[in-house]
Amino acid sequence: PENFPNVSDYRNLVLAESMRVMGFVNRFNRGIETAQLDLKDNGNEPAVFDLETLGVFGVIVKEKPIEKIPADFSNPWKSDNVNSSVNFYDLSETEKNIYSIIQENQGIKSVEIIKLINKPPRTIERYLKKLREKGLIEYVGSLKTGGYQIFVGNKTS
């Protein structure tokens, strides 16, 4: 093994040659080189061979480091353009009405939306919750003075 892994030393030449003739092996002496090239192509470090134990060898493969998501990452499915993000979702007529009311009246309270749409408060709250879950609107401010507005970017909380 002094020239390992560049030259292979077969323990049973008859078995090795018969494996090649039967088509189980393409070429001799290519496995380690192929594995090293694949590791390099994948962005990993080359494999390290442990040859200390007589008759066997170990292979140590280090995984490439996990890439961290940059702090300024933005969701590619969300758009700063409000209209394109709305078209992405299938909205009911009531959801569309509520969304357009909020779009025209940023900071509107649910009580005012209820008056404009003439639906029960529970129904309006349910639709507001659906729109919040879809990331289309957000509630900003305190319960007393806050209101709904169109969600256009990442929260900074």
Image (cartoon, rainbow, N blue to C red):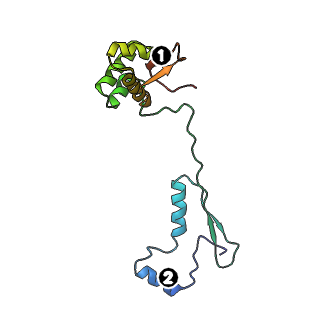
**Residue 50 in which image quadrant:** bottom right
Q: Position of residue 57 (x, y in %)?
A: 64, 72
Q: Is residue 16 above or below residue 149?
A: below
Numbered disc 1: secondary structure: strand
Q: Residue at x 41, y 24 (%)?
A: 125
In the picture of the structure, the residue carrying the numbered disc 2 is: 16
Q: Residue at x 41, y 34 (%)?
A: 77
In the picture of the structure, the residue carrying the numbered disc 1 is: 147
Q: Is residue 100 left or right of residue 34?
A: left
**Residue 130 in which image quadrant:** top left
Work out whether residue 113 or residue 15 is closer to the camera in this orientation and state it.
Answer: 113
Q: Tag 1: residue type?
A: Gly
Q: Residue at x 57, y 54 (%)?
A: 44
Quarter holding the C terminus is: top right
Between the C-alphas of marks 2 and 1, the distance is 77 Å
Q: Position of residue 24 (x, y in %)?
A: 43, 77
Q: Is residue 2 left or right of residue 19?
A: right
